[in-house]
Image (tube, grey):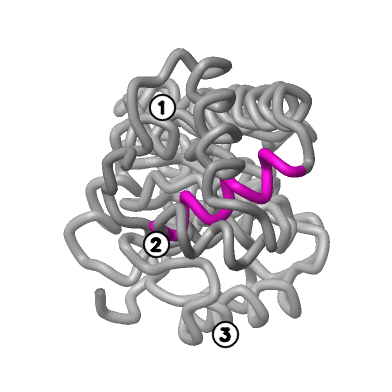
Amino acid sequence: MNNSVCLTPRPPHSSNQPDAAARDEIDRARQAPAILYIDHKNLTGECVGQQLAVLLLESTVVTVARVGDVPEGAREAGRFSVCIFNKHAALIGDSELAAEFTQLADLAPHLPLVVLSDVDDADDIVKAFALGVRGYIPINLPIKQAVEAIRLVGVGGSYVPSSFLSTSMQRGAAQNHTERNEHHCTERFSPRQMEVLQRLWQGKQNKMIAYDLKMCESTVKVHIRHIMKKLNARNRTQIVLLTRSLNEIDGVPIEYQNVSVS
């Protein structure tokens, strides 16, 4: 996008208005709270900026390519009610994006910020809100819903996409399920059986397990049979698969071999 500025006021109510009345209408629009739209790409900058002006008639929409392009006359305190920043595919933490955000914070420290993004990623959304972003709008959101999200942020609210909420709920449910399974499994096995399990995950033969734990090989086989019975497993491979939620050290799976019961 070039450095030109598109200042889109509310249109006059009638094309037959006298020039003086039309100028008054434009002056009132310029004095009203405005929405700042920042987009460094020509096509989306012009198209989205125009659509925002059409759908947000209660505000003036100022469209610029970069924060530095905001016109001097629009920089007074309280001029903008909200800023929409189209970051496209850039991720939160990108150096160029961070520089723009810093410049925007210097220009208007308390201006609510809405991010428009090609990226609909939960981690990116979390990082954005950690930086103080008040709304995160993925580009697959219908424009009318996006406009309502912008209005919500403009009056002091926050907007999080439903996809993020769904992902968070799924992650939470999966974590709770894993924690319940781990707690259940650790209660089912004795400390000695857990030691045998750990070596089964590492693919060790009965003879090596007996050596590690300083017990007879026949005792190892007894422990394995008891574990199989508790899990309703038919062999060592099934034992490993059925207890794989426990098969981690610092979050990294232990390598194991598929070894049949001897």
Specify the segment rendered in magenta: 192-204
Q: Is residue 35 visible?
A: no
202 in the magenta segment: yes
In what element is the residue under mark 1? helix
Residue 250 showing in the rendered view:
yes
Is 129 situated above or below 252? above
Residue 183 badge: none
Q: Quadrant of the C terminus?
A: top left
Q: x, y percentage for residue 103? A: 64, 81
Residue wearing tag 3: 99
- Residue that numbered label 1 is attached to: 55
Image position of 30 (left or right of 118): right
User: Does the stretch in magenta take in 111?
Assistant: no
Q: Could you say which quadrant of the image residue 104 lies in?
A: bottom right
User: 156 or 46: which is nearer to us?
Assistant: 156
Which quadrant of the figure has residue 190?
A: top right
Gap between marks 1 and 2 measured at Cα: 57 Å
Q: Which residue corresponds to the image point at 75% horizontal and 28% vertical from the top-left?
A: 183
Say above or below: 37 vs 1.
above
Dot 2 alpha-carbon crowd within 10 angstroms: few under 14, some 14 to 19, many 20 or more = few
Tag 3: residue type?
Answer: Ala
Single out the mark in the foreground, 3 or 2.
Answer: 2
Q: Which mark is residue 255?
A: 2
Inspect the image, locate mark 2, and give the three-letter code of the amino acid beneath it. Glu
Mark 3–mark 2 Cα distance, whole angstroms, equals 44 Å
261 or 62: nearer the eye? 261
Q: Nearer the viewer, residue 179 or 224?
A: 224
Neighbour tally class for label 3: few under 14, some 14-19, many 20 plus, Cα within 10 Å: few
